[in-house]
Amino acid sequence: MKIPTPLLQRLRENPRDFFKFLKVFDKQTNKLIPFVMNGEQEELLDALMTHKRIVVCKARQIGCSTLLRAYFLWRTYVQSEPTRHAIISYTRDSADHLHSIDKSFYFSLPKPLQRKLKKSSSRTLQFKDTEAELRSFTGGGKGGATRSFTFSSAHISEFAFLITKTNSLLIQLRQLVKDRL
């Protein structure tokens, strides 16, 4: 089913309209519940909408990664061209966990909003019509797993654990991320 153009236009213009359709896992009830942003997430979203580069020094459990995954899914969802948005984390488990949030968000969308997928794997979520994709990588391994790709944006998680590779990772990403890093 094709998404009505007025709705798609509204979703393109305001991520908050898109976020109303997302669900998050509630640890207390073990159920999916509607995603409602807290104050820190609201501030981070405002920053994402107005700045090219954002560094978040954060406390744990404020929902930063959840908001970033919602934002990256939104960016990918509203694209009209083939773009690639990266999740880079220190370990494969961490990168896979973050990508599982992307997939959970996507698969909890109402069926009429679930655009057809070209690929859905443990590391990639790609839309069939635009070929826009979310892809997860590790930054802690040898050889730079991201070198073969170009990105529109990147979410680097657990950056402190990449400290031994920080300079080379940043240099590499500045070359690979065209408009958001």
Image: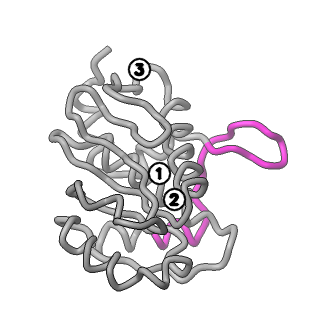
Residue at the far right in the pictured view: 28
Q: To which residue does mark 2 refer?
A: 67
Kindly state the secondary structure of the residue where label 1 is placed.
helix
Residue under the point 27% across and 45% down: 12
Quadrant where the N terminus is found in the figure = top left
Q: What percent of the width, then of the height, locates residue 147? A: 25, 61
Q: To which residue does mark 1 refer?
A: 70
Rounded to the nearest angstrom, the CA distance separating label 3 from label 2 is 23 Å
Q: To which residue does mark 3 refer?
A: 112
Amino acid, disc 3: Pro
Which corner quadrant of the image does residue 156 belong to?
bottom left
Q: Is residue 6 above or below residue 78?
A: above
Dot 1: within a 10 Å radius of its alpha carbon, few (fewer than 14), some, or many (20 or more) residues? many
Q: What percent of the width, then of the height, locates residue 39? A: 59, 70
Q: Is residue 30 above or below residue 4?
A: below
Q: Are marks 3 and 2 in contact (CB under 8 Å)?
A: no
The span shown in magenta is 24-45
Relative depth, front residue between 68 and 12: 68
Amino acid, disc 2: Leu
Q: Is residue 37 above or below residue 125?
A: below
Amino acid, disc 1: Ala
Count of marks overlaid on the render: 3
Camera-nearest label, 1 or 3: 1
Residue under the point 42% across and 56% down: 137
Q: What percent of the width, then of the height, locates residue 43? A: 48, 73
Among the two numbered marks 3 and 2 on one chain, the one whose residue lies closer to the N terminus: 2
| Left or right, 150 with reference to 164 | left
Q: Are marks 2 and 1 in contact (CB under 8 Å)?
A: yes
Rounded to the nearest angstrom, the CA distance separating label 1 from label 3 is 18 Å
Which corner quadrant of the image does residue 169 belong to?
bottom left
Q: What percent of the width, then of the height, locates residue 103? A: 51, 38
Kindly state the secondary structure of the residue where label 3 is placed.
helix
